Every structure is written in structure tokens, then in C-alpha cells.
């Protein structure tokens, strides 16, 4: 069934490409000969579309072949759209060079004049139309995945760092179309607890039993390299059960993005990077933080003044709420927020613990009775976070990063949770745009770890852009 869907998707892409390539040629002919686009055509050189039809059909076959060789039709889940555009540009450029060479040869043997400009226009239109087609194709795929069509049920074998990284990718990238039904732990009973939404279904020795009782499309094995026989044995069990097998190399329980490989006279040397964000990346991130924070403060100071006045008129107490949070490398700092609760709210928390709706060390109540009228609106719109821009200017926080925890949370962290302290906390992050308070604590940590391991400047840009609709919808804000 899975292979049939993949073949159907590939065939749909190829047929769509074939149609659009011919449409591009027709449009290019219309622009060149009927609209006189870019340059005037001598009436003596005017040519009907039929002259270019063989080129259109021949180029279609040539491009489909080149695209196939270049891997354009190898449908990889989560492949960036720009990567697909890059492959289209490469393949189309190759085809146009060959086409122009053929035209020069034909002109030598035949007196008929062919427009080279038209071929260049056709190439540009081919890239434009096929790129737009992939945007539409991707949108349809995501819509089908949201409805459960084409989703692959995945079992993760191993719950070390790479196992958690796989789970983090599933939470952070729903567009990949994977549903993790659970995981098999490779440690003692202390490792047998659930991780967020991901259920512990037993140990690695229970693989056959789990495959017999659950529908599994793919098994992802994340065991250490020190167990090669065990990995092969598990792979065979999964294949016999009809599941596709993928093996993630868990190099000494390190993510590959944190492994630095060099050589000494041909001898490989493996080192461990302390921080995954490079020095240049940190500088760019800091510069972006300062510029955007200063600009937003400049634009929103009238709104902040109105919020301060509303807080003062609504309830007694200070305008700003100050709280000690834990920042990068465990350093404490004072976080600023607009006060959204009545005075003494922190002292009331112990009394309300029975109503806590959050997991792990978090404390969240959907309809918290301590919220003021203005505070409820501020929480729903996240406007209470605006003063944290001053934390950003001070260098204590970043615009994008993990949620800043309070010291009591950090005291309850498991060892793997502490990795989220490797970078500066942020006002927004993957947790903010993926459900906010609706997320389980472990899921929030998995998203933070995915962000740390996969950071790029463009990831920050995407998260900031995704924050805007998340704020408007108010989903998970309480």
C-alpha cells in the first residue's frame, strides 16, 4: 500500500511536469511572437507555434529524464521546497544548454530562424511553473496527512539521545507524516517511563510481540554501535513482520551534529562539540535579537503604556512581574513580564496543585482563578511577554529559544532535560508555535532539543513568522 502511494505520487508529479513543460513552451511562444516580449520580432522571422512543437515534446522527454537522474522524483518526506527548486534549476539549465546547441546545428543546416530568446523564456517559465506545482503538491500532501492519509506508523527502538531526537523530529515536523506509536527502551526499568505522548511499549527484547499486536509501517533502530549483532537481529525481526527498517547510528549516544571528525595522518579523530551553534551563527543571532527587539520596543511603547495603565486600574500591585528564571548554562536571571495575576499569586500555588493540568515539573491551569481580568486577555494574546524584550537587549534571552524554566523545575530535570540549557532561552520557540501550554513537558523538551541540534538562521525566521498566526489563534495560551 505504501509503495503504491509513493508510485502514484511520483507518477502524478511526472505527468504534471510534462503538461506544464508544454504549457511553458506555448506561453513562451505567445510572449515572444505575439507580445514581442524583450525584443521586437522581424516579420520575416515570424513562426507559427507548430515550428516549436517538436522542440516542446523533445524537451519534455529530455527534462523528465534529467530530472529523474538528478533525483527530482525521489520523494523524500520533509525535503525543503528550495531544495526542489535548486534541482529544477540545475536540470532545466542542462536541458536548455543542450537545446541551444541543437538549435545552432539546425540553423547551420536549415535556413529557418529559431528564437533563442524564446527558449530562454521557456526555461524560466518551466522553472516557475514546476516550482509552483511543487508548492501546490506539497500543500495537498500536508492536507492529506492532517486527515491521516499517508501517515506512516513508526516504532522507535531505543530511547537514548538519538531515539529522543527521532521523537523530537516527529513533534517538530508534522509535515514528515510520521506517527510514533511508541518506543522500546534499551535500559533498565528506570528508562521504561513514557516520554510525552510517546508510550513505552517494552524493552528491545519485546520487538516481535509489539509488531504482532500493533500495525507498524516502519521501525527506526537507534541502538549504540556497540551492539551490531543485536541491531541486525532486530532488523531481521522487523523485516519478517513486513515493516520497513531504518537504522540511525547512535555514535556513543551523540547526535551527529555534535560530532567533530578530523584526521591525524589518516587516523580518524572524533571530538565532541560543546555548542551546536557556531560562533558566526551566535553573532548573527545576537545581532538579529538586538535589532528586532529595539525596533519592536520602539513601535509598541504606546501599547505598552496603555497595558501598564490598564493593569494599574484593574487591580492593586506593580505593573511588572519579576521572577527568577534559569538561563543559558544554568545562570539565573530576572525575567520581566506584565503582571497578569493578583498579588500573592505565587503563595497560592501550593493550594492549587490539585488542579494542575501540566505534566512533569510544570504548573498550568486552563482557567487559573488567580488571573485578573486584564491578565486573562494578556495571557490569551501573549502581550504579557512584551517586557521580555528588555531581557533580550540585556543578552539574558533571545527572540527564539527554549522556554526559560524556574529553578524549581530545573531541580526536577532528568539528565537529558538539562540539554535545553545549552542555549539562551527565548520569548518564542518551537514549543510556542506547536501548541504552547497544550504540550506535554517532555514534548516541550524534545522540541527544544530539536531546535538546539538543528538551529539555523532561517529556522529562527520561520519560527518568528509562525508565531504571528499562533498568537492570533490563541491556541494553547493559558
Image: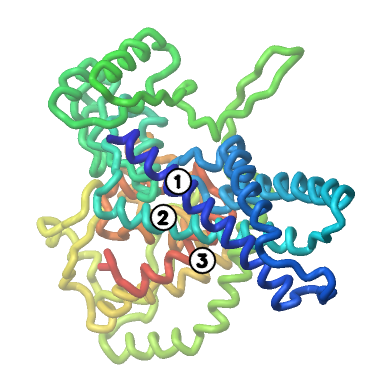
Residue 291 showing in the rendered view: yes
For the residue pair 256 and 104, the one nearer the viewer reads as 104
Q: How many marks?
A: 3
Tell me the mark number nearer the camera, choosing from 1 and 3: 1
The image quarter containing residue 429 is bottom left
Measured as percent of width and height from the top left, residue 335 is found at 43, 64
Query: Which residue is label 1 attached to?
Result: 78
Residue at 29%, 43% (x, y): give it: 151
Task: Note whether 336 is above or below 243 in the view shown.
Answer: below
Residue at 58%, 48% (x, y): give it: 83
State left or right for residue 347 relative to residue 65. left
Q: Secondary structure at mark 1?
A: loop
The image quarter containing residue 376 is bottom left
Residue 391 tag number = 3
The image quarter containing residue 161 is top left
Badge 3 crowding class, 10 Å Cα cut-off, few under 14, some 14 to 19, many 20 or more, is many
Query: Which residue is label 2 attached to?
Result: 430
Residue at 46%, 23% (x, y): give it: 249
Measured as percent of width and height from the top left, residue 3 is found at 34, 33
Task: Note whether 115 is above or below 100 in the view shown.
Answer: below
State left or right for residue 189 relative to residue 412. left
Q: Mark 3 or mark 2: name the one nearer the start of the chain.
A: 3
Which quadrant does the C terminus fall into?
bottom left
Q: CA distance from mark 1 to mark 3?
A: 34 Å
State left or right for residue 87 relative to residue 410. right
Q: Secondary structure at mark 2?
A: helix
Residue 329 showing in the rendered view: no
Amino acid at each position: 500500500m505504501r509503495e503504491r502511494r509513493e508510485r502514484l505520487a511520483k507518477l502524478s508529479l511526472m505527468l504534471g511536469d510534462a503538461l506544464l513543460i508544454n504549457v511553458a513552451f506555448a506561453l513562451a511562444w505567445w510572449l515572444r511572437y505575439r507580445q514581442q516580449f524583450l525584443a521586437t520580432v522581424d516579420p520575416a522571422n515570424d513562426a507559427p507555434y507548430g515550428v516549436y512543437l517538436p522542440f516542446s515534446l523533445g524537451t519534455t522527454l529530455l527534462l523528465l529524464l534529467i530530472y529523474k537522474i538528478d533525483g527530482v522524483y525521489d520523494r523524500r518526506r520533509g525535503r525543503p521546497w528550495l531544495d526542489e527548486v535548486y534541482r529544477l534549476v540545475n536540470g532545466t539549465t542542462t536541458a536548455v544548454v543542450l537545446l541551444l546547441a541543437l538549435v545552432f546545428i539546425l540553423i547551420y543546416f536549415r535556413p529557418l530562424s529559431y528564437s533563442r530568446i524564446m527558449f530562454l523564456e521557456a526555461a524560466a517559465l518551466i522553472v516557475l511553473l514546476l516550482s509552483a506545482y511543487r508548492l501546490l503538491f506539497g500543500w495537498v500532501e500536508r492536507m492529506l496527512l492532517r486527515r491521516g492519509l499517508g501517515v506512516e506508523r513508526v516504532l522507535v527502538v531505543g530511547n537514548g539521545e538519538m531515539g529522543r531526537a527521532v521523537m523530537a523530529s516527529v513533534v517538530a515536523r508534522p509535515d514528515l507524516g510520521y506517527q510514533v506509536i511508541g518506543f522500546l527502551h534499551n535500559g533498565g526499568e528506570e528508562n521504561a517511563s513514557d516520554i510525552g505522548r510517546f508510550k513505552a511499549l517494552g524493552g528491545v527484547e519485546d520487538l516481535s510481540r509489539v509488531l504482532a499486536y500493533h500495525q507498524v509501517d516502519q521501525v527506526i533502530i537507534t541502538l549504540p554501535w556497540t551492539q551490531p549483532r543485536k541491531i541486525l537481529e532486530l532488523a531481521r525481526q522487523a523485516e519478517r513482520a513486513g515493516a520497513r527498517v531504518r537504522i540511525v547510528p547512535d555514535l556513543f549516544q551523540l547526535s551527529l551534529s555534535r560530532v567533530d571528525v578530523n584526521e591525524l595522518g589518516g587516523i580518524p579523530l572524533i571530538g565532541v562539540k560543546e555548542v551546536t551553534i557556531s560562533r558566526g551563527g551566535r553573532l548573527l543571532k545576537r545581532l538579529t535579537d538586538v535589532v528586532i527587539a529595539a525596533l519592536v520596543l520602539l513601535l509598541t511603547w504606546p501599547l505598552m503604556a496603555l497595558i501598564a495603565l490598564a493593569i494599574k486600574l484593574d487591580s492593586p500591585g506593580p505593573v511588572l512581574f519579576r521572577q527568577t528564571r534559569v538561563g543559558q548554562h544554568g545562570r539565573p536571571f530576572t525575567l520581566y513580564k506584565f503582571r497578569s495575576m493578583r498579588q500573592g499569586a505565587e503563595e497560592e500555588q501550593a493550594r492549587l496543585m490539585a488542579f494542575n493540568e501540566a505534566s512533569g515539573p510544570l504548573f498550568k491551569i486552563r482557567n487559573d482563578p488567580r488571573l485578573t481580568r486584564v491578565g486573562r486577555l494578556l495571557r490569551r494574546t501573549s502581550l504579557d511577554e512584551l517586557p521580555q524584550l528588555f531581557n533580550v537587549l540585556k543578552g539574558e534571552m533571545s527572540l527564539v529559544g527554549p522556554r526559560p524554566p524556574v529553578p524549581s523545575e530545573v531541580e526536577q530535570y532528568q539528565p537529558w532535560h538539562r540539554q535545553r540549557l545549552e542555549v539562551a532561552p527565548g520569548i518564542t520557540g518551537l514549543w510556542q508555535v506547536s501548541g504552547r501550554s497544550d504540550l506535554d513537558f517532555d514534548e516541550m523538551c524534545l522540541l527544544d532539543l530539536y531546535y538546539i541540534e538543528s538551529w539555523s538562521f532561517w529556522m529562527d525566521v520561520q519560527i518568528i513568522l509562525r508565531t504571528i498566526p499562533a498568537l492570533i489563534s490563541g491556541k494553547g495560551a493559558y
